[in-house]
Amino acid sequence: YHPLVWFGHAANWAEQRFNKGNDKHADIVKGSVALLLVCLSPIVLLVWLQVLLVGLDWLRAALDVVVLSFVIGWQSMKQHSATVSDALATGDVEQARRALSLIVSRETVQMDETQVVSSTLESVLENAHDCLFASLFWFVVLGPAGALAHRLVNTLDAMWGYKTDRFLYFGRAAARLDDALGYIPARLTALSYALCGAFRLALQSWREQALLHKSPNAGLVMASGAGALQVRIGGPATYHGKLENKPWLGMGDTATQADLPRAINLVQRALLLWILVLAVFCLVAVWLV
């Protein structure tokens, strides 16, 4: 019943309708049209609701809360990470692999415990940016419509952003737009990790390793987060039957199961930092007015 599930169904319908053929330029155009088709309707509806509620401050505030509750998916990530951590704590690597498979696109069947931990940490650090900090950033900048726009585009990137034969060109618009929307929030997230962890190692990891990753945003977020935790994550991983030589990120010892709750705590400290900064900003703005 979650609205993002409805959105996912609409995105699947659009993809099946438009993603036909094998022409590079046509696929890029079709992917762009499909993106606009499924994203504009809910955004326009939200803006229309905001216009209707002009002057009704309490209702507009309630609408803001509802939208944020839809676009922020941090609680779900915490729960999935805890499931993996609990399974590893009892020595059940098989259960940990199954739990991990629900939050990553890579193949988990052959992973050992170290790889399971590393992959979970990558997901926690990266998804905290995608489903928490970036949404908060765009909410502050453009209000609930901005937060919703980011969440929808990020969801499409997760669905269409694969570099497979089917999505290489069709998903390009979603991937590029998601990179653009995440550019500033990713750097703020990486800085927040550094400020809330091992500052020097986080900045050094960010500076030396960010460009090693194919994503302009995910690499620096994960590098900074791993450095802040003083652990090393990443390395080769299998996607859709193909082995990818992903870079090693962070500095320090190889991550272990005990580092999973530490990563959650790092994200929550970073969130508290954001809230404090926003609270100070609001107080100063009120005082100036």
Image: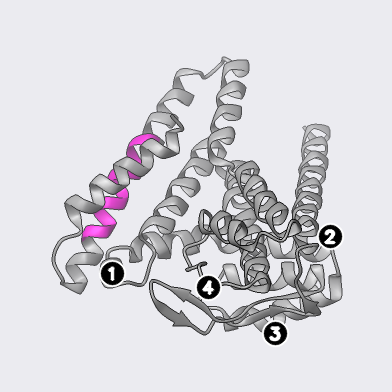
| Circle 3 Cα neighbour tier, 10 Å, few/some/many (<14 / 14–19 / ≥20) | few
Q: Position of residue 232 (x, y in %)?
A: 73, 77
Q: Earlier in the sequence, mark 3 or mark 2?
A: 2
Count the labels in the image: 4
Of badges 4 and 1, the one in the foreground is 4
C-alpha span from label 3 to label 2: 20 Å
Pointer 4: what residue?
110
SS for dot 2: loop
Amino acid type of the residue that numbered disc 3 sits on in the rendered structure:
Glu
Label 4 with label 1: CB-CB less than 8 Å: no
Which label belongs to residue 36? none
The residue positioned 27% from the left and 45% from the top of the image is 37
Amino acid type of the residue that numbered disc 2 sits on in the rendered structure:
Cys
C-alpha span from label 2 to label 4: 34 Å
On screen, residue 271 versus residue 162, left or right, reads: right
Q: Position of residue 220 (x, y in %)?
A: 64, 72
Q: Is residue 31 magenta?
A: yes
Of residue 195 and residue 126, the one placed in the foreground of this image is 126
Which label belongs to residue 196? 2
Magenta-colored span: 30-42
C-alpha span from label 4 to label 3: 30 Å
C-alpha span from label 4 to label 1: 30 Å
On screen, residue 277 versus residue 151, left or right, reads: right
In which quarter of the view is residue 75 placed? top right
Q: Please tell me whether the stretch drawn in magenta is mainly helix, strand or loop.
A: helix
Pointer 1: what residue?
169
C-alpha span from label 3 to label 1: 30 Å
Label 3 with label 2: CB-CB less than 8 Å: no
